[in-house]
Image (cartoon, grey):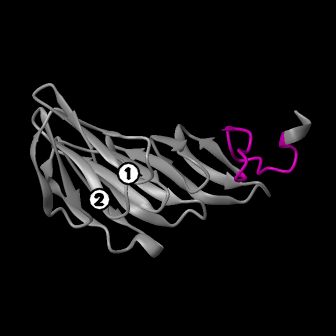
């Protein structure tokens, strides 16, 4: 295959680069990552690897997951049951509870992975819809409760930064 001529011969397989210039590599049953120049930027240490988006790469080892940035720098250690990155926020799940923290301009975000069953992606600045059991509430960027966990659901109301809610069959904004 001519597209692989410039890549190291000591790898078993490689994928095609995504638009961010990242691709997986496989050697001896372990995954790593290369850039568009064919340079190995993440060594082949992981049981699985997936390119989440243009910024983040999810890595797994021994059934636990972590997150790397597009340069291969570790953002989240592979100690979580699940991990995801969206914009500049890292979402993690451990023992059935979700938490998240911010990177760069979102560094003020720090919600411990201890009390929320689910966190939605940030829908308004510094506000997160969270679920505990089968009820939803609204928390701030550090996990403080703004609206109690008594709502059946939250949704975007169509207006910029407005959140609608449903509680006991009633809908409001």
Q: Give me the residue at 22% from left, 67% from top.
A: 142
Q: Give me the residue at 53% from left, 41% from top.
A: 50
Give x and y (percent) for residue 99.
Answer: 24, 55
Give x and y (percent) for residue 90.
Answer: 38, 57
Residue 14 magenta: yes
**Along the line of sight, which residue is nearer the eye, 164 or 2?**
164
**Along the line of sight, which residue is nearer the eye, 110 or 18?**
110
Give x and y (percent) for residue 115.
Answer: 11, 51
Q: Is residue 33 left or right of residue 16?
A: left
Q: Is residue 102 left or right of residue 30?
A: left
Give x and y (percent) for residue 34.
Answer: 67, 53
In this view, the residue farthest toward the top is 169
Position of 153 relative to 34 (above/below): above
Q: Please say if the residues under marks 1 and 2 sit with CB atoms less than 8 Å apart.
A: yes
- Spatial CA span between label 1 and label 2: 7 Å
Q: Which residue is mark 1?
A: 123
Residue 103: give its label: none
Give the SS element for disc 2.
strand
Q: What residue span does the magenta drawing correspond to?
A: 4-21
Residue 54 magenta: no
**Along the line of sight, which residue is nearer the eye, 21 or 164?**
164
């Amino acid at each position: 295959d001519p597209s692989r001529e410039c890549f190291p011969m000591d790898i078993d397989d490689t994928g095609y680069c995504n638009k961010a210039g990242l691709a997986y590599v496989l050697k001896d049953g372990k995954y790593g990552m290369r850039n568009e120049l064919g340079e190995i930027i993440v060594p082949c240490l992981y049981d699985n690897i997936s390119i989440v988006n243009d910024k983040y790469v999810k890595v797994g080892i021994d059934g636990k997951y972590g997150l790397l940035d597009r340069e291969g720098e570790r953002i989240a250690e592979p100690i979580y049951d699940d991990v995801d990155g969206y914009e500049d926020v890292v979402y993690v799940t451990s023992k059935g509870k979700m938490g998240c923290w911010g990177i760069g301009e979102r560094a003020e975000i720090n919600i411990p992975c201890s009390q929320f069953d689910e966190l939605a992606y940030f829908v308004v600045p510094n506000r997160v819809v969270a679920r505990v059991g089968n009820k939803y509430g609204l928390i701030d960027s550090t996990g403080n409760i703004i609206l109690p966990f008594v709502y059946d659901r939250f949704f975007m109301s169509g207006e910029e930064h407005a959140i609608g809610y449903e509680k006991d069959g009633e809908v409001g904004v």
